[in-house]
Amino acid sequence: MKLLIVGGVAGGASAAARARRMSEDAQIILFERGPDVSFANCGLPYYVGGEITERDKLLVVTPERLHTRFKLDVRTRSSVEAIDRAAKKVRVRDLSTGREYEESYDKLILAPGAAPLRPPIPGIDLPGIFRLRNLQDVDRIKQQVDQGVKRAVVVGAGFIGLELVENLVRRGITTTVVELQDQVLPPFDKEMTTPLAEHLATRGVSLLLGQSAEAFEKAADGLVVKLTSGQRLPAQLVILGVGVRPENKLAVEAGLEVGPRGGIQVDEHLQTSDPDVYAVGDAIEVKDFVTGQPTQVPLAGPANRQGRIAADNIFGRDTRYRGTQGTAIVRVFNLTAAMTGASEKTLQRAKRAYRKVYVHPTHHAGYFPGAEGMALKLTFDPTDGKLLGAQAVGGAGVDKRIDVLAVAIQAGMTVFDLEEMELAYSPQYGSAKDPINMAGFVAAGLLRGEHPQADVEAAVTASATGRPLLVDVRTPQEYAAGHIPGAVNVPVDELRSRLRELPPDRELAVYCQVGQRGYLATRILAQAGFEVANLGGGYQTYKLFYPQS
Ligand code: FAD
């Protein structure tokens, strides 16, 4: 077996190592256009900021190591220029010498990744404007930063953009983020990003949402970024983090099928439309694990697993890729945001029925010092309670909860399973009722009809027309510190004695701070004959939707 692999980082290097473990006899050649293989793309922003101090640490494995340990023929600075599928050959250009040659294959794996988008904006080629994909990019950015940058503009508030923001601020650079959408981290539901936007402001980051760069101009002290709003931002460094596009040129020119957004199409064995050619990683179109629809998810975990799976199949093991859940996490200064499965907006786009709940627990027992809060949102099927997605934002413990929920989604679990989950607990780590259990209790209670719940957005919009009546069941002090406009205040502890103050013929929506006292209030009111629902996640969820109020 002669196996050629195009691309030597996440998907390609994984495929190569797995292929060798599957076969000692195979001839395996790994082509990589750049000078490095298997480097840590995900660590690059932290090298700019100085949290990772040694460049060498970013080189996870060297070509020499791949050769000695895995007997791989690693050819760096070698670009695969074309595939001749009929003759089963590729044309390779040695970028060091300019020499071109052909290499035949029995099987070919494409792992060329995705390239950062370069929008056709006037001035985009000016010095001082960078994108970040590899070590050469990071060297250029770091060199600029080391020379002394006072102001930076990051265009795009996605994962990489925000990671860079954190690291530029760490280097003492005044940083502005420009984002076309009306939220940071566009894969998340907007309300879940509210704490991040607020947190960025506390760190001195200017966040310009709903705006885009329209031109870059040279200035005496660097550059000026001209926005569509007319605003002009001076900067000595601009980083573009506006997304990626699959590197599909080879595949397209070879006549392999690609999807509408450019991802190479593969089946569950990661085989392309040519049975001798496999494709993995950021370059491919995958099946969304939850909706079943085709999508593109540029993440390292899927790329690494896909590399293994492609190699397995080539060497006769029937391994299937189940689809991508989009489990992702990012640190933004002191906050962590993480998600898995379908977001609410994905479900809406897919026209998939769902229900949702919000809880606002602490990451471990509240009585133990250092408990940090989080907002946790679940989406699930309204009939059988099957989990569809989860998002969390907060301090410590967000990673653990999203990973547990990622497994639950993968296992096809329901909100009823979350009620029953037995998770590790001592006060430093969790609670006897873990945030996962709490989310399960609320969601399962909702489906069982024990816990009528109204969505904050719906209730607040409806309240403008006079229905339902919002009842704030928190203390007068909490109410005075901020409440939903139009709400009346009847603290839960006084509710039983003040029932007569509430209109018996009007629907009520009660809320407290996070939903717990509201739940008790709905039980009291429902048993007294009122038509009542609890606002899911209480005032804290309201503040996610309406942070300015
Ligand atoms: P890549 O890792 O991009 O590798 C593709 C390689 O193929 C490239 O080195 C390219 O030079 C080479 N190549 C392309 N065409 C050819 C050709 N014709 N001939 C020869 N070689 C070719 N993901 C996460 O899950 N978590 C993170 O925290 C995270 N952080 C990131 C931070 C940054 C700054 C970046 C850039 C990415 C980050 N990612 C993260 C995304 C993750 O790195 C990618 O999803 C993953 O590397 C994709 O793997 P891949 O093998 O498909 O492509």
Image: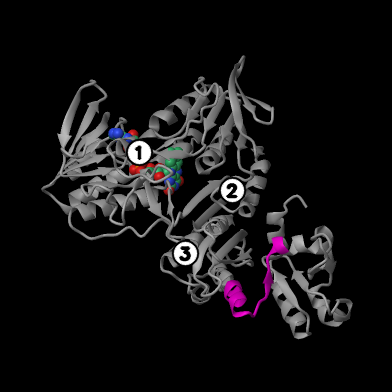
Quarter of the rendering containing residue 221: top right
Q: Is residue 208 above or below residue 147?
A: below
Q: Residue 473 location, x and y as percent?
A: 79, 71
The residue under label 2 is which amino acid type?
Asn
Q: Residue furthest right?
A: 501
- Badge 1 marks a residue whose secondary structure is loop
Q: Which residue is mark 1?
A: 248
Circle 2 packing at 10 Å, graded few (<14), some (14-19), many (20+), is few
Q: Is residue 175 magenta?
A: no
Query: In x, y percent, where is residue 183?
Result: 62, 46
Instruction: Write down the residue under mark 2.
Output: 334
Ligand 1 appears in which quadrant? top left
Please, what is the three-letter code of the amino acid marked with disc 3? Val
Earlier-in-chain disc, 2 versus 3 = 2
**Marks 2 and 3, how far apart at CA:** 22 Å
Label 2: which secondary element: loop
| Magenta-drawn segment | 441-458
Residue 451 located within the stretch drawn in magenta: yes
Q: Quadrant of residue 111?
A: top left
Q: Could one spot residue 363 in this view of the protein?
A: no
Residue 397: x and y in percent read 53, 59
Q: Which residue is mark 3?
A: 404
Q: Mark 2 or mark 1: name the one nearer the start of the chain.
A: 1
184 left or right of 493 in image: left
Q: Position of residue 535 (x, y in %)?
A: 71, 68
Q: Nearer the viewer, mark 2 or mark 3?
A: 3
Residue type highlighted by circle 1: Asn
Q: Is residue 329 left or right of residue 273?
A: right
What is the magenta segment's predominant secondary structure? helix
Cα distance between the residues tagged 2 and 1:
37 Å
Quick check: 198 left or right of 37?
A: right
Whether ligand 1 has any atom under 8 Å from the Cβ at mark 1 is answered as no
